[in-house]
Image: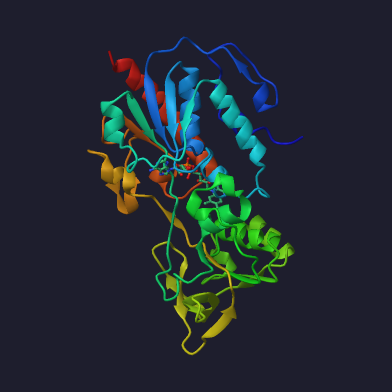
Amino acid sequence: PPPPPFFLLIRRPPRPTRVTSSAASDVYTTPPPPSGRKVAVIGAGPAGLAVAELLAEMGHASTVFEYWPEPGGVLVYGIPNFKMRKQIVDDYIAHLEALGIEFRCNTYVGKDITVDEMLDGEYDAVFLGTGAGVGNELGIEGEDLEGVHRATDYLVRGNLLPHQLPEHLQEPLPQPTKVAVIGGGDTSMDCVRTAVRMGAETVTCVYRRTEAEMLGRGEERINAREEGVQFEMLTAPLRILGDENGKATGVECIRMRLGEPDDSGRRRPVPIEGSEFVIEADTIPIAIGYGADPVVPETTSGLSTSWGALIEIDDGGRTSRRGVFAGGDNVNGADLVVTALADGRVAAEAIAAYLDTLD
Ligand SMILES: Cc1cc2nc3c(=O)[nH]c(=O)nc-3n(C[C@H](O)[C@H](O)[C@H](O)COP(=O)(O)OP(=O)(O)OC[C@H]3O[C@@H](n4cnc5c(N)ncnc54)[C@H](O)[C@@H]3O)c2cc1C
């Protein structure tokens, strides 16, 4: 049988009367009476959606603020359709709307409205589920050439429809001929497999260590190989080459060997002098990891962060700012859907306990 919709996995024993069936749209609940409390949830990814749902089940209203035009976080704006059916997310959002949860998309918190303004206004508490969606850069020559993309921009333009995207990303990607994806994790595999589906003639994954050090799931690499993706292991990009029109034409690379282990415990790649060579490519997605967006910490008073704008919390998801909670990738760094859901669940309980203390 197919796996259950992911939201069923986060359910705890229901408080209200409930009849469920296997389809999200067939879930009926009798919510408890409204508590009169209202929570702002920032970010409509798994962490934020879990918080909003669990609070609704306790009678607390919430508004979910989201930067992208549609809710779902990386479930929609990252993980490609061929890896996860988007109907699952659509059904879940329909279920949340039926619970009375309000969505305000196309809203960049920190710029359009701040957390301080929310707490001064109609909201009793705030949950920060802003993820870690800022793609790391290589910091090499040629990164601004046409045809070079951050992984998420490439994935959303390659897999979503223009109306699902903000204006600056609505132009469809040109037909690729030769694609070189830099990086060797799961996001990189999503990029190479997207390139295959877009009809690229050659798709190459460039990774500076060996397969043994790759952090992503082996299953994803098996899928990619079966689809014809080439792997250039022990290879690092030196610069991106372009033509006179500013379009990328290839990646100059250097071969590496493995040296002593680094801080991550993995053997450090060391360049082999004189081994430079060029991989021709007109499309070059950069998939070398993600960091958290600092805009919310920078615009929220009293919010402590650690290195890389990650938000500090206690074991109940409470931040250093009273009434502000956090969880998911903006706390853990780039991680997994299940961890974000679990964090949301912990934070929802803590938020409910906090709301009970307000008179
Ligand atoms: C390409 C890719 C593939 C992945 N594949 C898998 C996989 O197969 N399995 C797995 O378990 N995990 C996978 N992950 C990781 C997983 O998706 C994340 O760990 C998970 O989505 C984190 O959930 P979250 O709610 O913390 O953050 P996100 O899903 O990132 O959601 C955060 C949301 O907050 C919004 N936001 C951020 N800042 C603001 C702001 N200032 N104002 C308003 N909105 C804001 C963002 O737009 C986003 O929608 C993948 C990640 C990527 C990038």
Q: Position of residue 276 (x, y in %)?
A: 51, 86
Residue furthest to the left = 302
Q: Position of residue 196 (x, y in %)?
A: 69, 63
The residue lying at 32 percent from left, 47 percent from top is 295
92 above or below 112?
Answer: above
The residue lying at 50 percent from left, 35 percent from top is 341
Q: Position of residue 353 (x, y in %)?
A: 36, 20
Q: Position of residue 113 (x, y in %)?
A: 33, 37
Question: In this view of the protein, which residue sits in the foreground, 11 or 72?
Answer: 72
Residue 266 appears in the rendering: yes
Question: In this view of the protein, which residue sits in the foreground, 86 or 129?
Answer: 86
Instruction: Name the side, left or right, on which 337 lies relative to 128.
Output: right
Residue 317 appears in the rendering: no
The residue lying at 44 percent from left, 44 percent from top is 131
| Quarter of the figure with residue 75 | top right
Colour convention: rainbow
| Quarter of the figure with residue 260 | bottom left
Instruction: Name the side, left or right, on which 323 lies relative to 244.
Output: left
Q: How many marks?
A: 0
| Quarter of the figure with residue 139 | bottom left
66 above or below 351?
Answer: below
